[in-house]
């Protein structure tokens, strides 16, 4: 090994060796000069107003620069941390949700036996009808007493009841929905898995037990009838139960009574149109968190209607003084393939109408 005074690359060739050489320690080769941190300015540079006699030389670049080295170290640390977290704390895959079953819908028109009763004032009709004690609007669908269940807290049960009630209000009491012009407010309360079926039911309704728009919402034909005032009488109930450990079921059973007049005739007599609905909802924990529901079953009976009218798209009520058209749904062929759901029709009981 060279001594402390040796140049960086060893003793230069041609330099006399031996310990007797008194100038050996001050002999500098080119490599020694290049390795120096300080460099003396030349005479010409000192003349040009350079105050210091020397300048600092930039360090020699040997291998990676300090910045590149730091970057490599940071990348290695980040990669090691990611690997460690992946091994020790792996992300849990989201719980698989069962695909939403298609909602089953049943719409039954109720035909009157005679002429539909009418009056000049809706209040008189309500007073002489079974809806006399019904409450107005959403107040007719109060929340029941609720409590926690085996797998759901009381607050989750309350949330499920509130969502179900909101669905009833939006789908059956909103004037924009009733006239057939608004569906988005109802759609937003549904689980996204049901959007496709809902959209198809609204855009291409069919009486097939799956795609009746009137199974999802109460929609009147605006060319046939209009609301006579803003008061809609309602009476109903909500009940809940666990369908299994992962879901709550809420059933909304309610009767709604609408005062109607013929479209375009504000002076015509008023008649009452009654709708009886039962909606079954399923809520898992994601639905409760996202304020949405899965509608699994919808049953609707409404009258006075004519059995000869199509009820899948819109409800076309019979109004004051009108009678049901002759005819009704065609018979069901038990040998036919495809959907087994046939058209249904019932008779509206006389005591279900105002007794004037």
Image: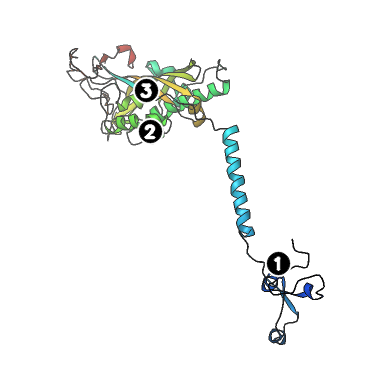
Seen in the picture, residue 218 relative to 5 is either above or below; the reply is: above
| Quadrant housing residue 43 | bottom right
Image-based side of 279 in relation to 79, left or right: left
Between 228 and 297, which is closer to the camera in this rendering?
297
- Element under disc 3: loop
For the N terminus, the quadrant is bottom right
> Where is mark 1, residue-wise?
10
Q: Mark 3 points at which residue?
A: 101
Q: Which of marks 2 and 1 is nearer the N terminus?
A: 1
| Viewer-nearest of discs 3 and 2 | 3
User: In whole angstroms, how far apart are the C-alphas of marks 3 and 1?
Assistant: 86 Å
Q: Earlier in the sequence, mark 3 or mark 2?
A: 3
Question: The residue tagged with tag 2: helix, strand or loop?
Answer: helix
215 displayed left or right of 25: left
Relative to 136, residue 91 above or below:
below
Residue that label 2 marks? 175
**Can residue 121 be seen in this snapshot?**
no
Q: Where residue 29 sits in the image (x, y, percent)?
A: 69, 73
Number of numbered markers: 3
Label 2 to label 1, Cα distance in Å?
99 Å
Q: Which of labels 2 and 1 is toward the front?
A: 1
* N-terminal-most mark, 3 or 1: 1
Residue 9: image location, x then y, percent: 68, 67
Residue 333 image offset from top left, x and y in percent = 18, 14
């Amino acid at each position: 090994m060279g001594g402390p005074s040796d140049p960086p690359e060893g003793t230069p060739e041609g330099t006399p060796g031996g310990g007797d050489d008194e100038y050996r320690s001050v002999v500098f080769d080119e490599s020694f000069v290049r390795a120096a941190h300080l460099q003396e300015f030349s005479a010409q540079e000192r003349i040009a107003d350079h105050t210091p006699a020397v300048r600092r030389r930039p360090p020699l670049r040997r291998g990676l620069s300090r910045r590149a080295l730091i970057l490599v170290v940071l990348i290695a640390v980040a990669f090691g941390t990611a690997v460690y977290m992946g091994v020790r704390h792996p992300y849990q895959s989201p719980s698989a949700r069962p695909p939403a079953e298609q909602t089953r819908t049943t719409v039954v028109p109720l035909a009157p036996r005679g002429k539909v009763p009418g009056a000049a004032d809706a209040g008189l009709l309500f007073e002489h009808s079974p809806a006399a004690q019904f409450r107005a609007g959403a107040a007719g669908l109060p929340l029941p007493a609720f409590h926690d269940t085996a797998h759901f807290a009381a607050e989750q049960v309350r949330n499920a009841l509130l969502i179900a009630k909101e669905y009833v209000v939006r789908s059956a009491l909103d004037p924009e929905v009733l006239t057939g012009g608004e569906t988005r407010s109802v759609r937003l309360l549904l689980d996204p898995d049901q959007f496709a079926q809902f959209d198809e039911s609204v855009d291409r309704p069919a009486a097939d037990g799956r795609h009746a728009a009137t199974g999802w919402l109460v929609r009147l034909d605006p060319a046939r009838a209009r609301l006579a005032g803003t008061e809609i009488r309602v009476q109903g109930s909500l009940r809940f139960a666990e369908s299994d450990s992962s879901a709550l079921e809420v059933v909304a059973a309610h009767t709604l009574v609408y005062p109607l007049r013929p479209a375009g005739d504000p002076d015509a007599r008023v008649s009452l149109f009654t709708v009886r609905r039962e909606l079954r909802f399923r809520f898992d924990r994601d639905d409760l968190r996202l304020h949405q529901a899965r509608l699994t079953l919808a049953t609707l009976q409404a009258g006075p209607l004519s059995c000869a009218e199509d009820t899948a798209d819109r409800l076309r009520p019979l109004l004051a003084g009108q009678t049901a058209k002759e005819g009704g749904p065609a018979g069901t062929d038990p040998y036919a393939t495809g959907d087994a759901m046939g058209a249904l029709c019932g008779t509206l009981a006389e005591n279900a109408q105002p007794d004037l």
